């Protein structure tokens, strides 16, 4: 548990040859019934140590737990591991990323309890002056594990979640819990990030090796988003267990807060251009305001030329008639028409925030009888 707002576990996609979702769900159904896993995180630097439990039966599932200064949440987290009712072989792979609090004392206490219950515990880590970061810690915990499947107790089959405290990130939590199976793919470009949140991921060791390691650049890097994008590039699928199996804790010291919005934005735009815009000849940006103009300015020159219009409901913007891109080096400056959404042509890249207009935006969109993923995508 890496001082992050992570929580339980969910299952990732498997390689097609491994009978995909059916096999993943079979394992997930056993692993995930107890809705209590909460997480921690962290991993090492200079001198790495690993406590190996020795040989034994082949492990089916490895719970991956990076830890850094997580004493406040570790007891709850490890208690949730002890309460899992998975009937196969299970191990807990912990990597301590230079914790300076009492995390290791708690881990050693729980190691005895968990191994009494038949759960193998592997502990690695380092005691350097500074932590190496979430990505490094996850990679080390995975490297020392032996399970066929990985369950990220910090943590691509996903699940619904319960937020703690209950009223934190209400819109985000509604979004997480209400995506359809199709939207798990079509809404991967939004500012919310992965459509199955990292604390719920479940995937095979084999697939993790195919996708590659988490980015180890450290603080300020969205390692889960980058891994998720690589997963999709490799052709991985995304599935959701429609049960609330995770207590997803929010707190102000979460590693998530170290990632700048501008960093996330840059990766999202790049992924949108790579996966969608290169295949579109023209498109309309829905929102002639700040977010829509920001997206336009962030696009490559090639994709800027594909924007045939902005659309909006604001009469003042529509009356102005156009948006002039004054920072362009072109002469004359590009002027993009601004139209009412009913007069605009799809496909749309939508830069309007969901669940924020009392349903008005959603009703406007529905009135056009468009198909998500074909006629429009959300980038809000």
Image (cartoon, helix red, strand yellow):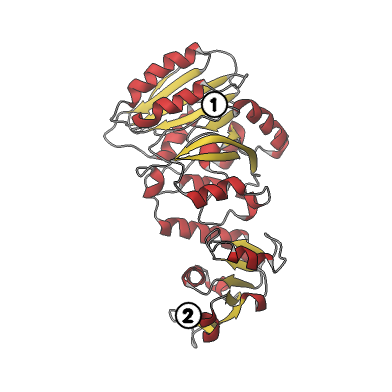
Rendering coords of residue 4 (x, y %): 41, 40
Which residue is the extreme one toward the top?
A: 116
Residue 98 visible (yes or no): yes
Q: Closest to the observer: 182 or 65?
A: 182
Q: Is residue 111 left or right of residue 308?
A: left
Q: Residue at x 61, y 74 (%)?
A: 306
Q: Residue at x 50, y 88 (%)?
A: 332
Q: Closest to the observer: 101 or 38?
A: 38
Rendering coords of residue 100 (x, y %): 28, 30
Give the CA distance from mark 2 to mark 1.
Answer: 52 Å
Rendering coords of residue 10 (x, y %): 58, 35
Q: Compared with residue 339, is residue 59 higher up or lower down, i.e. above or below?
A: above
Which residue is the extreme one toward the left?
A: 129
Which residue is the extreme one toward the bottom?
A: 332
Q: Which residue is mark 1?
A: 62
Q: Compared with residue 150, is residue 237 higher up or lower down, i.e. above or below?
A: below
Residue 333's label in the rendered image is none
Q: Name the N-terminal-most of marks 2 and 1.
A: 1
Residue 226 visible (yes or no): no
Residue 57 falls in image quadrant: top right
Residue 202 falls in image quadrant: top right
Provide the secondary structure element on which disc 2 rests. loop
The reply to whether callout 2 and callout 1 are in contact (CB within 8 Å) is no
Q: Which residue is mark 2?
A: 325
Rendering coords of residue 107 (x, y %): 39, 22
Mark 1 is surrounded, within 10 Å at the Cα level, by few (under 14), some (14 to 19) or many (20 or more) other residues, namely many
Provide the secondary structure element on which disc 1 rests. strand
Quadrant that contains the N terminus: top left
Q: Compared with residue 254, is residue 367 higher up or lower down, i.e. above or below?
A: below
Residue 371 falls in image quadrant: bottom right
- Count every numbered label the image shows and give the total: 2
Mark 2 is surrounded, within 10 Å at the Cα level, by few (under 14), some (14 to 19) or many (20 or more) other residues, namely some
């Amino acid at each position: 548990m890496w001082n992050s707002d992570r929580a339980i576990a969910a299952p990732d996609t498997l390689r097609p040859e491994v009978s995909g979702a059916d096999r993943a769900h079979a394992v997930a159904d056993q692993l995930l019934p107890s809705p209590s896993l909460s997480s921690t995180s962290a991993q090492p630097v200079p001198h790495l140590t690993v406590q190996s439990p020795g040989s034994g039966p082949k492990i089916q599932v490895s719970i991956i737990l990076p830890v850094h200064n997580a004493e406040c949440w570790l007891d709850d987290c490890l208690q949730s591991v002890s309460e899992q009712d998975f009937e196969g072989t299970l191990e807990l792979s912990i990597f301590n990323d230079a914790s300076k609090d009492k995390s290791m004392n708690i881990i050693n206490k729980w190691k005895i309890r968990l191994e009494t219950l038949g759960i193998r515990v592997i502990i690695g880590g380092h005691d350097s002056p500074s932590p190496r970061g979430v990505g490094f810690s996850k990679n080390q915990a995975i490297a020392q594990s032996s399970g066929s499947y990985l369950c990220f107790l910090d943590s691509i089959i996903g699940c619904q979640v319960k937020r703690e405290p209950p009223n934190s990130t209400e819109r985000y939590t509604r979004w997480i819990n209400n995506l359809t199976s199709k939207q798990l793919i079509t809404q991967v470009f939004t500012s919310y990030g992965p459509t199955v949140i990292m604390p719920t991921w479940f995937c095979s060791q084999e697939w993790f090796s195919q996708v590659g390691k988490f980015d180890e650049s450290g603080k300020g890097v969205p390692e889960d988003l980058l891994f998720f994008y690589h997963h999709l590039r490799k052709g991985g699928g995304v599935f959701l267990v429609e049960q609330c199996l995770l207590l997803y804790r929010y707190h102000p010291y979460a590693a998530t807060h170290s990632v700048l919005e501008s960093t996330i934005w840059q990766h999202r735009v790049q992924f949108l251009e790579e996966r969608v815009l290169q295949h579109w000849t023209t498109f309309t940006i829905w929102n002639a305001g700040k977010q829509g103009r920001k997206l336009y300015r962030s696009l490559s020159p090639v994709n800027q030329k594909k924007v045939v219009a902005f659309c909006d409901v604001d009469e003042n913007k529509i009356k102005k008639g156009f948006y002039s891109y004054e920072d362009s080096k072109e002469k004359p400056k590009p002027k993009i028409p601004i139209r009412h959404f009913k007069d605009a042509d799809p496909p749309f890249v939508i830069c309007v925030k969901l669940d924020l207009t009392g349903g008005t935006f959603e009703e406007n969109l529905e009135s056009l009888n468009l198909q998500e993923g074909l006629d429009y995508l959300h980038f809000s």
